[in-house]
Image (cartoon, rainbow, N blue to C red):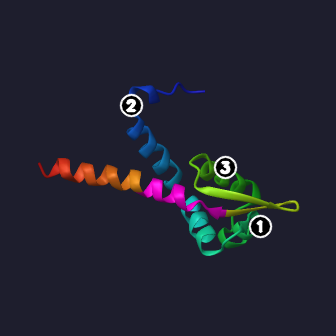
């Protein structure tokens, strides 16, 4: 396992990197879009919509959950996912602030 040097960077830099790492995969983007369009979506629905295997979907869901973007609800033996709007807004704010500050710095 590789050694992480995250401690060399500030909290904001690490937070932007964590969000963009998760958002940096097209399958995850497709899954987030599908979940946002179909409230209380389960893994089987994501398999059908993306064409990816169930284990692959589960791996991607785990990565998306790491940044808190998904809510989970258990019904019987199934897990259903929806977007955590509060966390979505936090993600948008953090990433947007990064780009706005970068643009301001470029214009100095």
Q: Residue furthest right?
A: 76
Mark 1 or mark 3: whose residue is earlier in sequence? 1
> On the image, which quarter does residue 73 sit in?
bottom right
Q: Is residue 103 left or right of residue 11?
A: left
Task: Give the dominant element type of the magenta stretch: helix, strand or loop.
Answer: helix
User: Residue 43 location in percent, x, y?
Assistant: 74, 63
Other residues around mark 3 within 10 Å, as few (<14) / some (14–19) / many (≥20): some
Q: Residue at left 50%, top 28%? A: 4
Of residues 59 and 86, which is closer to you in this image? 86
Mark 1 or mark 2: whose residue is earlier in sequence? 2
User: Residue 70 location in percent, x, y?
Assistant: 63, 57
Closer to the camera: disc 1 or disc 2?
2
State whether residue 85 appears in this view: yes
Q: CA distance from mark 3 to mark 2?
A: 24 Å
User: Residue 28 location in percent, x, y?
Assistant: 58, 59
- Which region shows up in magenta? 82-92
The residue beneath circle 2 is 9
Q: Residue at left 88%, top 62%? A: 76
Task: Give yes or no for contact between labels 3 and 2 (Cβ–Cβ under 8 Å).
Answer: no
Q: Residue at left 64%, top 53%? A: 60
Judging from the image, what secondary structure is the residue with disc 3 in?
Answer: helix
Residue 75's tag is none
Mark 3 or mark 2: whose residue is earlier in sequence? 2
Q: CA distance from mark 1 to mark 3?
A: 15 Å
Residue 62's tag is 3
User: Residue 57 location in percent, x, y?
Assistant: 69, 58
């Amino acid at each position: 396992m590789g050694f992480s040097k995250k401690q060399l960077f500030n909290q904001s830099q690490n937070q932007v990197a964590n969000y963009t790492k998760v958002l940096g995969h097209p399958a995850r983007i497709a899954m987030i879009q599908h979940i946002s369009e179909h409230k209380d979506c389960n893994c089987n629905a994501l398999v059908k919509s993306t064409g990816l295997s169930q284990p692959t979907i589960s791996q991607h869901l785990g990565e998306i959950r790491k940044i808190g973007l998904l809510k989970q609800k258990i019904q019987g033996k199934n897990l259903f996912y929806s977007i955590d709007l509060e966390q979505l807004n936090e993600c948008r704010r953090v990433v947007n602030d990064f780009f706005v500050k970068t643009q301001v710095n470029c214009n100095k």
